[in-house]
Image: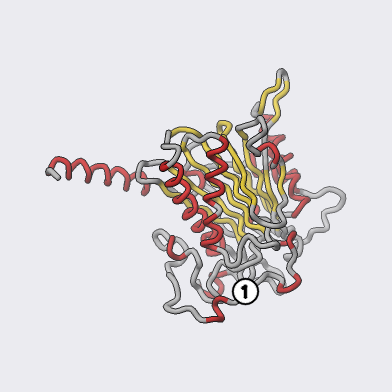
C-alpha cells in the first residue's frame, strides 16, 4: 500500500469515528425519528411513542407465544400499506393498545396519515407489555388512561429521551431485576446507521444468574451497562432457568418489545428480513427467550436515505442490528430504578451500582 493510500484510509477511518462519536446511542440517531414518553408514577405504567417525521417503510416479526399487537396485519407483506407514521409501545396489557389511538389523534392534528381521497388516516401499529400486577394503582374506572398517555407521548416526542423506568418501561420487570426501556445505536463500516429501542418485560433474566454480568456483555460498547464483562467461569446454578412469577408465570405477563430503525433504503420484504435477523439480539440478551411465556415482537422501520446491497449489505445491517438490540435490552435493565412498592423487584443498580 502506498503512503497516499494509507493517508486516505486513515482519513476514512477518522471520518467514520467522528460519525460514531457524534451519535447519542439512541434510536433517534436515525435522522427523522423522534421518541416521546408519558407515564404515571401512581399507575406504575406508561407509553412510549416512536414518531417518524416522514412515513417509514416497516415490517414486523413476532417470536413470542403471547403477543399483544395493534395493526399487525397492515405490516404483513401481502398487504397494501408499506409505510407507517408511528409505533405505539405501552404497558397495560390489552388496555394499553388504546395508546395507538391517542397517537393517531395527535398525528391527525398534524395532518399526517395515509390519504384516501379526502380522508387521512395515521398508520400507527403498536404492541403492549403486561404490567398490571406490579403494585401500581390500576383502578382507573371505566376507561383506561392509555389513549391520553399515547397522545401526550406523541406530543412529547423529541431527539432526547429517558432510559430505564420511563414511558412503556416504567412498570416493566424481569425474572430477577426491575426491567425498563433501553436504546442503542451503531453504524456499519459503510456509514449506514441502525438503532434500537427495547421495552424489557421478559419472563426470563437479562443477567447471568443473580450476578452483575449481562448476557449481552460481549456486545457492550464503552461500558454502557457497567462494563462487568462475563464471569470467569460458569456454574450450573448460573444456567438454571429463572422465570418471573416462577411456575405461576403466564403468556400474557411477559414481553420484550423492540423497534429497530435504520436510514438504509429497504423494501417492505427487506424490512421484514431485518426484523427477523434483529430478533437474534433477544437470544443474546435474555435467558430463556421466545418462550410460550413471552410476547416478543420486533418492529423494523427504514427511513430510506442510504442505498445498500440487497444481499451482503442487508446481511451486514441485520448483523449490526442484532448486536444493537442486545445492547438496548441490557441498557434498559441497567438504567432502571425500582418501583416504590412493597415486594418490588430491586433494580440492577440497587445491587451492583
The residue drawn where x is 64% and y is 70% is: 175
**Nearer to me, 179 or 70:** 70
* Residue where numbered disc 1 is placed: 241
Q: Residue at x 61, y 69 (%)?
A: 177
* Left/right of residue 6 with respect to residue 86 in the rendered view: left
> Is residue 96 placed above or below 32 in the rendered structure?
below
Provide residue 92's location: percent of width, then percent of height. 74, 54
Residue at far left of view: 3
> Closest to the observer: 81 or 158?
81
Residue at 55%, 51% in the rendered image: 197
The percent coordinates of residue 311 (x first, y second) are 44, 40
Q: Residues within 10 Å of mark 1 (few under 14, many from 20)?
A: few
Seen from the viewer's position, the closer of residues 332 and 243 is: 243
Would you identify the image quadrant in which residue 115 lies? top right
Q: How is the image coloured?
A: secondary structure
**Vertical order, 132 against 47 (above or below):** below
Q: Secondary structure at mark 1?
A: loop
* Left/right of residue 169 with respect to residue 274 in the rendered view: right
Q: Position of residue 78 (x, y in %)?
A: 66, 34
Q: Position of residue 284 (x, y in %)?
A: 51, 62
> Where, by quadrant of the figure, is residue 106 drawn?
top right
Amino acid at each position: 500500500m502506498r503512503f497516499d493510500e494509507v493517508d486516505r484510509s486513515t482519513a476514512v477511518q477518522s471520518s467514520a469515528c467522528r460519525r460514531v462519536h457524534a451519535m447519542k446511542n439512541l434510536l433517534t440517531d436515525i435522522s427523522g425519528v423522534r421518541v416521546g414518553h408519558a407515564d404515571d408514577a401512581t399507575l406504575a405504567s406508561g407509553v412510549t411513542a416512536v414518531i417518524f417525521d416522514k412515513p417509514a417503510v416497516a415490517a414486523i416479526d413476532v417470536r413470542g407465544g403471547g403477543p399483544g399487537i395493534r395493526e399487525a396485519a397492515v405490516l404483513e407483506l401481502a398487504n397494501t400499506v408499506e409505510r407507517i407514521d408511528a409505533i405505539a409501545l405501552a404497558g397495560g396489557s390489552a388496555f394499553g393498545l388504546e395508546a395507538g389511538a391517542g397517537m393517531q389523534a395527535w398525528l391527525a392534528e398534524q395532518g399526517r396519515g395515509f390519504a384516501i381521497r379526502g380522508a387521512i388516516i395515521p398508520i400507527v401499529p403498536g404492541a403492549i407489555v403486561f404490567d398490571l400486577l406490579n403494585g401500581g394503582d390500576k383502578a382507573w374506572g371505566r376507561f383506561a388512561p392509555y389513549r391520553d398517555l399515547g397522545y401526550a407521548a406523541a406530543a412529547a416526542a423529541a431527539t432526547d429521551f429517558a432510559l430505564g423506568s420511563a414511558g412503556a418501561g416504567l412498570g416493566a420487570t424481569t425474572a430477577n431485576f426491575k426491567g425498563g426501556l433501553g436504546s442503542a445505536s451503531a453504524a456499519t463500516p459503510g456509514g449506514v446507521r441502525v438503532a434500537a429501542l427495547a421495552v424489557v418485560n421478559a419472563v426470563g433474566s437479562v443477567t447471568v444468574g443473580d450476578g452483575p454480568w449481562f448476557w449481552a456483555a460481549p456486545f457492550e460498547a464503552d461500558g454502557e451497562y457497567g462494563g462487568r464483562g462475563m464471569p470467569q467461569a460458569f456454574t450450573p446454578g448460573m444456567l438454571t432457568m429463572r422465570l418471573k412469577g416462577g411456575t405461576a408465570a403466564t403468556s400474557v405477563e411477559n414481553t420484550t418489545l423492540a423497534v429497530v430503525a435504520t436510514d438504509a433504503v429497504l423494501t417492505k420484504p427487506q424490512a421484514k428480513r431485518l426484523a427477523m435477523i434483529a430478533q437474534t439480539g433477544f437470544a443474546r440478551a435474555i435467558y430463556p427467550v421466545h418462550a410460550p411465556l413471552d410476547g416478543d415482537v420486533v418492529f423494523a422501520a427504514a427511513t430510506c436515505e442510504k442505498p445498500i446491497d440487497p444481499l451482503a449489505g442487508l446481511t451486514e445491517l441485520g448483523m449490526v442490528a442484532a448486536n444493537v438490540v442486545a445492547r438496548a435490552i441490557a441498557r434498559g435493565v441497567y438504567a432502571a430504578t425500582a418501583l416504590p412498592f412493597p415486594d418490588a423487584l430491586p433494580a440492577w443498580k440497587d445491587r451492583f451500582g
